[in-house]
Image (cartoon, coloured by chain):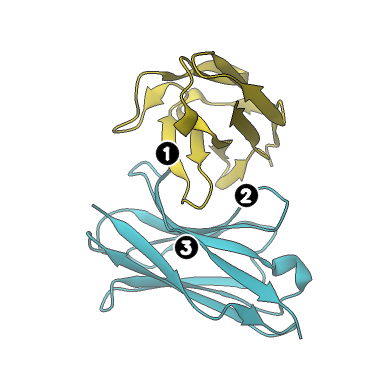
Chain colours: A cyan, B yellow
Amino acid sequence: QLQLQESGPGLVKPSETLSLTCSVSGDSISSPYYWGWIRQPPGKGLEWIGNVYYSGNTFYNPSLESRVTISVDTSKNQFSVKVTAVTAADMAVYYCARFSGNYRFVEYWGQGTLVTVSS
Amino acid sequence: EVVLTQSPGTLSLSPGERATLSCRASQSVRSSDLAWYQRRPGQAPRLLIYGTSSRATGIPDRFSGSGSGTDFTLTISRLEPEDSAVFYCQQYGSSVYTFGQGTKLEIK
């Protein structure tokens, strides 16, 4: 059974860079799927951040594209997200996910990790 | 960007009743690109329905999806206490995924 586990700092200062990693177990990240990040600010809806293919190809939410980088580390079976110049609006529960083979929907979700933005 | 509007915001029903959750899109969505998820308290979201009406692996047949164009529905028949959760619809189009704001289902 595929499992995804997010890790990273739970507290980030404004204007700094948020970095999270998703560890994949039960499958190889080199499988032909898109891996992605989704977040949910407190009291708000889910927002897709971006996806990375095992080959390294990426596509991002246009609203975040200028500040986001998603990458894959096949040697560690992990993928990561970086969000630069964070503000209070970036405070959210961040989920990592594996998308379906046709990349239309999310087949597997991580448990999520809360990132607080505060000085 | 396609905006998905879910209704009602909260639904309170008794065990054994039927729940009907609506997801309306701001523009037409291909049937293949509409999915539903359930998030129970303290748990990760899980896929219920994909391609508008196909149940994901392990999802009981009490859950069914329907719709087309801009109007989609998730129906849960014979409600059970474990169905208490927030339900989200999601669409994929023009290389962007968007989600509805969610419907909270409470089982009395």
Q: Are marks 3 and 1 in contact (CB under 8 Å)?
A: no
Q: Are marks 3 and 1 on the same chain?
A: no
According to the picture, the residue beneath numbered tag 3 turns out to be A58
Give the quadrant of residue A75.
bottom left
**Toward which corner of the image does residue B20 lie, by quadrant?**
top right
Q: Which mark is residue B47?
A: 1
In-image side of B84 versus A119 (left or right): left
Q: Secondary structure at mark 1?
A: strand
Residue A90 visible to the viewer = yes
- The crowding category of the residue bearing disc 3, from other C-alpha atoms within 10 Å (few below 14, some 14 to 19, many at least 20), is some
Q: Which tag is nearer the camera, tag 3 or tag 2?
A: 2
Disc 1 residue crowd, few under 14, some 14–19, many 20+, Cα 10 Å: many
Residue B24 visible, this angle: no
Q: Is residue B35 above or below residue A73?
A: above
Q: Chain of mark 3?
A: A
Determine whether the residue tagged by mark 2 lies in a helix, strand or loop: loop
Pointer 2 chain: A
Q: What residue is drawn where x is 55% and y is 47%?
A: B95
* A39 sits to left or right of A77: right
Q: Amino acid at mark 1?
A: Leu
The residue that label 2 is drawn on is A46
Q: Earlier in the sequence, mark 3 or mark 2?
A: 2
Q: Nearer the viewer, residue B19 or B71?
A: B19
Position of residue A91 measured from the top left corner of the image (x, y, whole percent): 69, 68
